[in-house]
Amino acid sequence: MGFTGFTLVMPFLPLYIRQLGVTDIGEIALWTGVTLGVSPAIAALTAPLWGRVGDRFGNKLLVQRSLVSFIAVMSAMAYVTKPWHLFALRAVQGFFAGYGPLTLSMAALSAPREKMAIAIGTVQTAQRMGPAIGPVIGGMLAPIFGLRNSFFVAAGFYAVALIMITVLFKEPPRAPRPAAGRQRTPFASILAFENFLLVMLVLFGLQLVDRSFGPVLPLHVGGLGYSPAEVPVVSGLLFSVLALTAALGNQLSSRVLKQHSPRVVIIWAVMIAAAALGVFTVSRNIWLLAAALAVVGLCIGTSITTAFAAGGAVIPQDVHATAFGFLTSASLSGVAISPVLSGLIAARSIRGVFVVGVAMLLILAFVVRRVMVERNPPMEVAPAVEES
């Protein structure tokens, strides 16, 4: 519900900024980029801190706080009169954001340990499907109600999500708080968990590649010789293929982890994704482009869920939300940096974006093969760390 509400209006942000009086295409693109990028950037910085609060007071309370802030901010966006108003509201939204990663932590804690990957993959699938549905609903509502009123509809989606989490979710018992004289597990100790920094690097790299398509895919399609009328249709098809297959990959992860270790799954999935992206880079036929991108999406979705499951397998319960905050911080950093990096590379060569993506995936496979400690299934969660 939350991701659907967000994508119900955000894909149409350039049109809204134009309504606010900005006419230059370059300025519209600039305002759109910084407005969309500021929220994940701030959320990446604050995720571990909110996770620490979640470990102390419970994740449910923090998700409720986040959803209330989204209701207020989305409603306020319907009244803005300047582009910087949107930017400021998105910055506030970034500070209070975090319901996405918190729901991953909640799912991981609620499920039996042997089904952690299934729980994480199911929530990630929901997060993928929201952006697939939201723009369709927004596209139908905007001509009827107008862009401004669409923000109220988006706020309504968050209100429904708030009611659902308040009424339906039962939070499992939290780990006992540290006794007097004992310190909580410091951030440095969390980062020292087995494979944890490597998992953060993998998530960062995968998001860099996954989010690199957005700014350049329509330009790449246009450069292949498709007419201006065909570009939106072909691009939309390819985006849908990427989103849907990534959602399938989120589900596939739990199945392959029953037979193979996270190290093996990540290495093979990333290598296959690199090969498929190479095929995509040199292809011109629409069906071959779609097939290659389907493999990329499937493998990246599988790798991301596997990386989260590998990180969750070594996290003690008393710092679960904090550790997931670090994992999310790495993921959101990739989300925030990827469009900027893609734009800089695309200024020289659009195909260069995909070539860099292939190289990055191969580097990730090499690093995981050399550095990651083998952890065979079933993945057992590490016990709580004793502090002196």
Image (cartoon, rainbow, N blue to C red):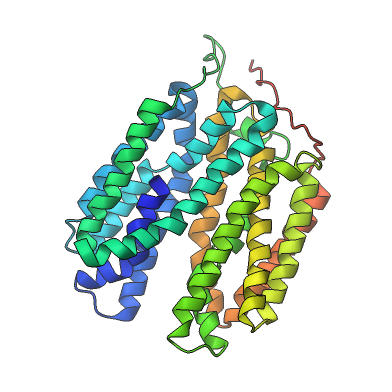
Where residue 41 appears, as percent x and y from the top left, is: 44, 53
**Could you say which is closer to the camera, residue 284 or residue 273?**
284
- In the displayed structure, would residue 216 be above or below residue 104? below
Q: Would you say residue 186 is visible in this rendering? A: no
Q: Look at 51% across and 52% down and name the residue there.
A: 128
In this picture, residue 124 sits left or right of residue 18: right
| Residue beneath the point at 24% across and 79% down | 23
Task: Report x, y in % for residue 171.
Answer: 47, 23
Q: Give the left or right position of residue 141, taking residue 265 as reference.
A: left
Image coords of residue 352 (percent x, y): 62, 78
Considering the image in quadrants, where does the N terminus appear?
Answer: top left
Which residue occupies the foreground of this view, 291 or 7?
Answer: 291
Task: Decide if residue 128 is in sight here.
Answer: yes
User: Does residue 379 sit above or below 136 in this rendering?
Assistant: above
Return the x and y of residue 279 as percentages of the image width and height: 71, 75
- Residue in the foreground of this view, choosing between 88 and 302: 302
Left or right of 7 on screen, residue 193: right
In the depicted structure, whether residue 215 falls above or below residue 119: below
> In the image, what residue occupies the spot 23% across and 51% down?
152
Q: If the image is split into quadrants, where does the C terminus sit?
A: top right
